[in-house]
Amino acid sequence: MKGKVGMSGKRVLIVDDDEDMQVLLQTVLENQEYEVVTAEDGLAALEELEKSAPDLILLDLMMPRMDGYAFTEELRQRGLQSTIPIIVISADVNAKQNTEQLGADSYIAKPFDVRDLLGEISHLMEHLIPEEKIQEPQARGMQKNVME
């Protein structure tokens, strides 16, 4: 549909333990024709990454099991952090200053204006995602090593 901010077929991974936030973000993004996958924490997000690479990650920082800090460190260790744009969405007062240290591409404070979020997503999708991005990370180790 013309005039929408979204990019049809682009996949967004939402990593947030707040189910209401997941539903809100998923609804907003699907209305903009994004494909959306959700995960309740960093461990669940890593499982989703094993299945398929997203075009962008929306990441909360404060979550149980594996928080956003540990998640971004794991992405860095897997060599994936620079290939997938990350927007930190957090109410954590230290999140903004930590965003750069995390290697995230952007920060949006909770509560946020949906239009600001959509604008930032659109900007990152248009400017930070190379055309061949999806194939290379999968070939570099997104799938589990089955050698025993």
Image (tube, rainbow, N blue to C red):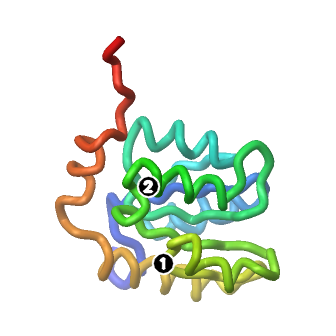
Q: Residue at x 39, y 63 (%)?
A: 84
* Quadrant in which residue 3 is drawn: bottom left
What is the quadrant of the C terminus in the image?
A: top left
Q: Position of residue 27 (x, y in %)?
A: 61, 62
Q: Which residue is mark 1?
A: 105
Disc 1 to disc 2, how far (Cα)?
A: 20 Å
Q: Residue at x 34, y 62 (%)?
A: 83
Q: Residue at x 76, y 43 (%)?
A: 65
Asked if 97 appears above or below 36 in the picture, the reply is below
Q: Secondary structure at mark 1?
A: loop
Residue closest to the eye, 104 or 52: 104
Asked if 84 appears above or below 88 in the picture, the reply is above
Residue 83 lies left or right of residue 101; in this view the side is: left
* Quadrant in which residue 114 is drawn: bottom right
Q: Position of residue 44 (x, y in %)?
A: 62, 40
What is the quadrant of the N terminus in the image?
A: bottom left
Mark 1 or mark 2, which is nearer to you?
A: 1
Q: Which residue is mark 2?
A: 35
Q: Residue furthest left?
A: 132
Type of amino acid under label 1: Asp
Residue closest to the eye, 134 or 113: 134
Asked if 142 appears above or below 5 in the picture, the reply is above
Q: Earlier in the sequence, mark 1 or mark 2?
A: 2
User: Label 1: few (<14), some or many (≥20) within 10 Å?
Assistant: some
Type of amino acid under label 2: Glu
